[in-house]
Image (spheres, coloured by chain):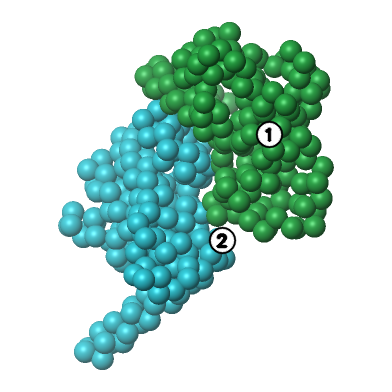
Chain colours: A green, B cyan
Amino acid sequence: MKKYIQLVLILFIISAFSGLILGVVNEFTAEPIKAANAEKLSKGIKEIFPNIDPLSLNDANNTVSIVDEDYEELKEYYIIKDTAGNLLGYAVKVLAPGSYNGKLTVLVGINTEGKVVGLSYLALGETPGVGSRVEEPDFINYFLNITDTSHIAKLLIDKDIDSVSGATFSSTAVKNSVQSALDYFNANLKNK
Amino acid sequence: MTKKQNLLKGIFQENPVFVLILGMCPVLGVTTSLLNALGMGAAFTVVLILSNILISLIRKLIPNDIRIPAYIVVIATLVTIVDMVMNAFTFSLYEELGIFIPLIVVNCVVLGRAEAYASKNGVVDSAIDALGMGLGYTIAIAIVASIREILGSGELLGFNIIPFNLFEPATIFILAPGAFITLGFLLALINVIVAKRNKKTVENK
């Protein structure tokens, strides 16, 4: 009995020490990680909306969290305005449901008419060379200027989308993300 | 064994990838481009050196019954540190390597060296062993990655290196089967060389 208590104690000490070290490292890396993520986000938004007023991204009022149990995969959206203050559209951040490693995060750009104007990936951990090809323009182009993804669902089933053959999980996850961003737009943002 | 032999054994006689055939998951997974392979090799080597040093330091404090969980905790902590540091300071590389950084935890080379070497040897020797193994691993995946990147995308380190578009890159080399094909041919080549050399030594005797 004494032996087991000793074993548990030693493992406990090692684990506690590890936790302590990780806490210290986290103190140093948390800020740079946050800055890198913010940089990535603003770059992604600028790709979709080149005419955006770059300063408007710093305005906290332009970032709106989405808390809606019907849209659990939607995290937040960003109100996109140009330098004159005109509304260009919205960029919806979606944690794609059913992606291959569970962290595919995509920005879906929707203009004021409800058409998709661009996609940009914030986190893409899909299989290199297979799932990661959802990043290619060939695939993204399928989504441009659409208001509904049902025809893309059909293309995916018929395997008519060459660029992502074999990557059913990733491409379906992206398709579902776009659809749920569009649904949310039509339900909540369209007539604002 | 001298320190030099200790260092070189990880690169040649006991190369973790080509001879021991250990830690194959990232070998197949991240070798789609040379840059990824070098990044992975660097992260892996750092973890391996630190884990060998730490485990060698605490080897006498750890009871035999719980050595494996203790090693795993040490390795997992080191990998998490590398993961956070890379996320903070080498963001684009971190995104490319993605899932393979956390997976260093279960890379059997790291645990294997802890169990087979660091738990029985002093700190300096363990560090040298880790450096040799890390270099051997990095060189091996860099070779696999170079072949795959050249044949699969016609580039090396992102530069187009096919003059006058002599051949069309074969995408299969970037995909998973290409990793197996490349590795299979490389292992065959190495075995041929080793077999020839052994034959020569026998004949000389």
Q: Which residue is at 50% across, 45% downward?
A: B100
The answer to whether marks 2 and 1 mark residues whose Cβ atoms lie closer than 8 Å is no
Image position, residue A2 (x, y; %): 53, 24
Image position, residue A161 (x, y; %): 70, 55
Image position, residue A137 (x, y; %): 57, 47
Q: In the picture, which quadrant includes the C terminus of chain B?
A: bottom left
Residue placed under numbered mark 1 in the picture:
A116
| Mark 2 neighbour class, 10 Å CA radius: few under 14, some 14 to 19, many 20 or more | some
Query: Which is closer to the viewer, label 2 or label 1?
Result: 1
Instruction: Check disc 1 and give the amino acid type.
Output: Val
Can I make out residue A22 in this image?
Answer: no
Instruction: Check disc 2 and give the amino acid type.
Output: Ala
| As drawn, B37 above or below A37 | below
Q: Which residue is at 66% across, 40% downward?
A: A144
| As drawn, A28 above or below B169 | above
Is disc 1 placed on a helix, strand or loop?
strand
The chain ID associated with circle 2 is B
Residue placed under numbered mark 2 in the picture:
B176
The chain ID associated with circle 1 is A
| Mark 1 neighbour class, 10 Å CA radius: few under 14, some 14 to 19, many 20 or more | many
Cα gap from disc 2 to disc 1, whole angstroms = 33 Å
Q: Which label is found at residue B6?
A: none
Is disc 2 placed on a helix, strand or loop?
helix
